Amino acid sequence: MTITTSSPTATTVRIDYAATLDQRSKVLILIGVLLGLFLSALDQTIVSTALPRIVADLQGIELIGWVSTSYLLASTAMVPIYGKLSDIYGRKYILLFGIVVFLLGSLLCGLAADMTQLVVFRGLQGFGAAALTSTAFAIPADLFAPAERARYMGLFGAVFGLSSVVGPFIGGLLTDNLSWHWVFFVNLPLGVIALGFIVAKLPRLHSGLMPAIDYAGAATLLLTVIPFLLALTLDKNDYPWTSPLILSMFAVSAVGLVLFLLIERRAESPILPLHLFRIPTFTLTALIGVTVGATLFAAIFFLSLYLVNVLGVSATAAGTTLIPLTLSLVVGAMVSSQIVQRTGNYKWVIIVGMAIIVGSLWWLTTLTPDTSIWMVRLRMIALGLGLGPSMPILNLAMQNAVPRTDLGAATASRQFFQQIGQVVGSAVFGALLTGVLTTSLSTSLAPIQAQLPPDLAARFDSSALRNGMSASEGASGEVVDPAVRIEQAIAEQFAVRRDLITRALRDADPTAIATLRSDPQLPAQQKAMLEMVETLPAAAREQALTQVLARLDEAEQTARAEGRALGQQISTALKSAFTDSVTTIYRYAVWLAVIGLILALFIPQLPLQRSYGQDLPPLME
């Protein structure tokens, strides 16, 4: 067999952008990329504060969960696909496509006329956001060699931290002073600025290879991921874990996974190159990403439940309590990046970060109903210092170990696994919380409910209280204490009784008399008085009314004192149940973080590459 080789003129050397681009161009490109990433990160936090106003305006509260679910499905499922496409066509084109689609989705969301349209357009936003996040983490790998890249990795953690702080604030500001439409429209000017930087300064950043696109792999990946995510995120009150729909979705996902693996083994240019799993660093960082994603969700989401339902702070105050976590995360990311830049040792930075996460989660298991808000903030600061080094340096370690031709796919895949960890963590920990909370509340409330009238006891049923006291807020947004609610109910009942007695004795109102006679709780003496009320003179009726109202006032004071005591018992039971449930979540999260720490111990410490010279094989046109 004769082998024909190409002439020298047909050989093209892949461009080493890390060596050819000047520092000023790299910085401008990085600004544009960070702006694009900030758009995606901001959108995940800015919308939440506007949701109540959106639902009030568009109606359709039954679709409120899909506003985030449609975004999550599209953004998670498309991340690996965009990562591979960026390796083939270049980061620039995929990033520009993602920003344009994201901005189009933002515009349409702002113009949505009903909830159905908003859900669809949020999915379009997620479709574009996946391109932003998958390429944004890969572009630094094109611009900077690993040894130089470390100093910039902290900026990406800072972007997510900044978005989580300013997002809810900007969302509330725009919703209150303009309208909820502007939480989407605000993306447009920022997106145009990011487009300007990227169009003007970002080179194509392509591999130079043009392999066949893995359409079958992309299709089976979507067949695997979308049913899996839907099965996890659908409301389990409507669709229990054992329902035919959920089980069938898991079955379809399993079939899709088998087909995906079979196709990827034979594909010329697979969406998820399976040979990457033969690289220990890639496999380990992907698995650690799953644990970090799950523990991060548990730490933030379930802490908010504790703050609102146990410490009694408002939803707004609960959001501000998470600011120390965000700021310490930014500090941890920036400091750890500089340490790796100077020492070249990323392994021990990751290990120390994971160890701090383990310690912080254990510290969160010690929360009690009496823990002060400042002690909660200290726990958040510690957790942020652990998360800060973990996330960006895991990316650096992975990118330093994989072939440059697979950088986009590898970076997107690691991010994909972390997002899957968040979704799985939310579903599993959410189910665990519901089970523990329901059992604890049922046990604690049963003897208290037995002392309440049936209509009042129904207001404090465990199935209602497990949703938290945030559903019972006053006009100013403060949480109404159970004792106050019981006193208000007692006062309303006595006000009705006082009105009936007044009309019966003073006015001899037949309707009021008939209503009182039918009341089994009416004292016998008062029933006897009602029998002769029409024969009594007005002065006698007024004297009797004064005496009855005086006794009624005494009875009301006694009832309110007893109700206040029962309300305090309910409040204590509720706080204890929520505390036990949240700390149970953290106890499981600790073990998940320990697994991540153990995996980190096995990450190889490879020298950080100072150039791509040896990783740039010639390409045949």
Image (cartoon, grey):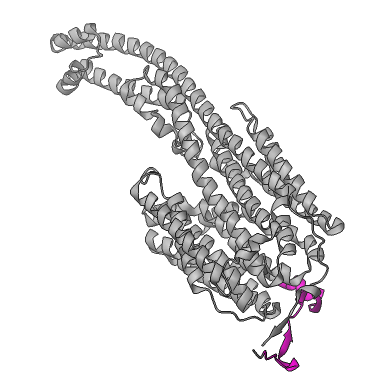
Instruction: Kindly identify the residue that appears in the image at 77 percent across and 69 percent down.
Output: 144
Residue 261 percent across, percent down from the top left: 52, 63
Image-based side of 291 in relation to 114, left or right = right
Residue 2 percent across, percent down from the top left: 66, 91
**Residue 262 is one of the magenta-drawn residues:** no
**Viewport quadrant of the N terminus:** bottom right
Q: Is residue 186 visible?
A: no
Foreground residue, 103 or 536?
103
Residue 235 lies, with reference to residue 341, above or below; the image says: above
Foreground residue, 338 or 112?
338
**Residue 21 is one of the magenta-drawn residues:** yes
**Viewport quadrant of the C terminus:** bottom right
Q: Is residue 409 visible?
A: yes
Instruction: Kindly identify the residue that appears in the image at 51 percent across and 36 percent down.
Output: 478
The magenta segment is: 3-30
Residue 318 lies, with reference to residue 23, above or below; the image says: above
Foreground residue, 155 or 509?
155
Q: Quadrant of residue 203?
A: bottom right
The residue positioned farthest toward the front in the image shown:
1
The residue positioned farthest toward the left in the image shown:
535
Image-based side of 316 in relation to 149, left or right = left
Foreground residue, 152 or 87?
87
Could you tell me how many numbered marks the image carries? 0
Residue 18 percent across, percent down from the top left: 78, 74
Residue 617 percent across, percent down from the top left: 74, 78
Residue 153 lies, with reference to residue 29, above or below; the image says: above
